[in-house]
Image: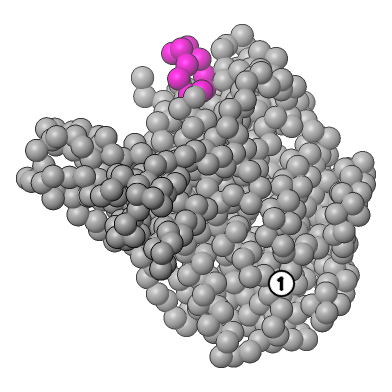
Amino acid sequence: MKNLVVLSGKGGTGKTTVTAALARFAAGERRLVMVDADVDAANLGLLLAPREREATDFVGAEAAVIDAEACTACGLCAEACRFDAIAAADGTYRVDPLACEGCRACKFVCPEEAVAMEPQLSGRRYLSDTRLGPLFHAHLLPGQENSGKLVTALRRDAEAWAERERPDVMLTDGPPGIGCPVIAAASGADLALLVTEPTPAAVHDFRRILGTLEHFGIPALACVNKADLNAERREEIRVECEARGVALLGDIPYDEAAMDAVRAGRPVTDGDAPRLAAALSAIWDALRPHLDA
Amino acid sequence: MILAIASGKGGTGKTSVAVSLALAAAGAGRPVRLLDCDVEAPNAALFLPVEIAEFRDAGLLVPEVDMAACTLCGRCAEVCAYGAISVAGEQVLLFTELCHGCGSCARQCPTGAISERRRVIGAIESGRAGAIDFAQGRLTLGEAMATPIISQLKDWRLAAPPETLVILDAPPGAACPVIETLRGADFALLVTEPTPFGQHDLEQAARLARESLGLPTGVVVNRDHPGDDTVDAYCREADLPILARIPLDRRVAEAYAAGRPLHDALPDGPERFAALLARIEAEVPA
């Protein structure tokens, strides 16, 4: 099985649109499993009409709770907390569950044993069926820390499934950024496909995600969305790819039909967006040998 | 006033709106400070003539074990919630990239064998961009934890005189780095686009900003498109005020690609963003 993750650094460059189109081409030729690893903003399912098969609660971290009856307001907990999560309130101390990182430092220092740790329900993970193949996806409850842990749990679900079912390709729609959830989504991937745009912000962040992938030794490929917006920056991307040995698989034109496809809730390859469909089909053709290698 | 710009979905125009509001405030002669809290992908400086004057490391306190004093009792591993320290045979193994810097291992070690050292995971920088006071954080490539850098950036540069407008440009998403950015803000401005993606992620961000953090919240609809009512309908139902709309236009996208924020890309940019700022201030309880 080849494990391909779609990333970008900057958000909103078209990762999900590209993932859905590639899924559509891949599913015509191979056994495919998909993972939506952008659990903060899980959008791949909005294009694939998933039918839920299994759902599992995700209990990510714990948060501290102080028993006001037992608390003597000595303040040792607040002193030990490095996350500004504990403050004095009404003659006792209170934990802000949004700031608590579940480290238990307060519990260890409390002389009255007034601190308990409570598991936090931080989201749900799903296995759903789509017409292109199974989709592993998740919903993060807003305000829960550590989406990276949920991404890791989702990846483990998908890998356990793949161990049994032996698909040819695992296609993961990754989160934006370069930090914890991105590292969780990319770890163990055979290849990353980076979606960038010819804009200063996207090119800047393209270099940051490339550097991150180099750090972890994950080979990268690239494609350029809205490639015709700025010729100079498109050239800058080409030069960067050449210098770093990154294969540039192709360009996708600026086309407002991309938004229409999202509105219709389908991959751009299914609707009235012939230019986008042709561009993505060419990118799939250029990607195929990397999956076969 | 502390104004945080967030979105849920990436690429909706947070940074361009944040920079544009800073330019509008500075244009009106108002003291303004912009903090780029998207430390994984810090882009605000690309739109402004930023000159960095001060630079600091951003880091975490991680354990260091004095093996001469260690009795291999394993208490450190027992108290670590992150699996960042373990005892194997005659050795103490450190996995510092997993360490959140809570200090429990050092505090709980019965022989005082653990001290702490600072591990650098990024940088925070401050300077000026014309009349705008500017600061940003940057996560080092390969590092996982963005939140401590945001927290150190805010500790360093959030406090400002009361007449200063402080604008926080948040990262996308709805998890810990966004919470860290939004904490302590007076208002959350959520930038979205009128698609099912935009709407879905706006709902996540609105739940976080308004319900979890209790912030007054408003919406900017970017790439607005006549005939699409999805985001409008949601905002009406959720009682979220739409404070500005920016039209979908290839010329705006081209100007953005040339490095111009919305303030400069739209023909009436300065007026639009001055009006948006006035609407936000009207929404913030005195």
Task: Give the percent coordinates (x, y) of residue B183.
Answer: 41, 36
Q: Residue at x 75, y 53 (%)?
A: A210
Q: Residue at x 63, y 89 (%)?
A: A166
Which quadrant of the rendered structure holds the C terminus of chain B? top left
According to the picture, the residue beneath numbered tag 1 turns out to be: A190
Q: Could you say where residue A5 lies in the image, as x and y percent from the top left?
A: 68, 67
Which residue lies at the image location 65% right of the left edge and 38% below the top edge? B42
Residue A188: image quadrant is bottom right
Viewed as shown, does residue A136 lie left or right of A278?
left
Seen in the picture, residue B279 relative to A3 is either above or below; the reply is above
Q: Nearer the viewer, residue A23 or B126?
A: B126
Which quadrant would the N terminus of chain B be assigned to in this image? top left
In this rendering, position of residue B197 left or right of residue A239? left
The answer to whether any part of residue A109 appears in the image is yes
Q: How many marks?
A: 1
Give residue A116's position: percent from left, percent from top: 19, 54
Q: Is residue B244 visible?
A: no
Check the image and name the residue furthest to the front.
Answer: B68
Q: Position of residue A156 (x, y in %)?
A: 51, 75
Residue B133, quarter of the rendered image: top right
Disc 1 is attached to a residue of which chain?
A
Up-down relation of residue B87 to residue A70 (above or below): below
Name the chief secondary structure element in magenta: loop
Residue A269, by quadrant, is bottom right
Magenta highlight range: B157-166
Q: Is residue B152 left or right of residue B38?
A: left
Q: At numbered mark 1, what does the secondary structure look like: helix, strand or loop?
A: loop
Q: In front: A169, or A70? A: A70
Amino acid type at mark 1 = Asp
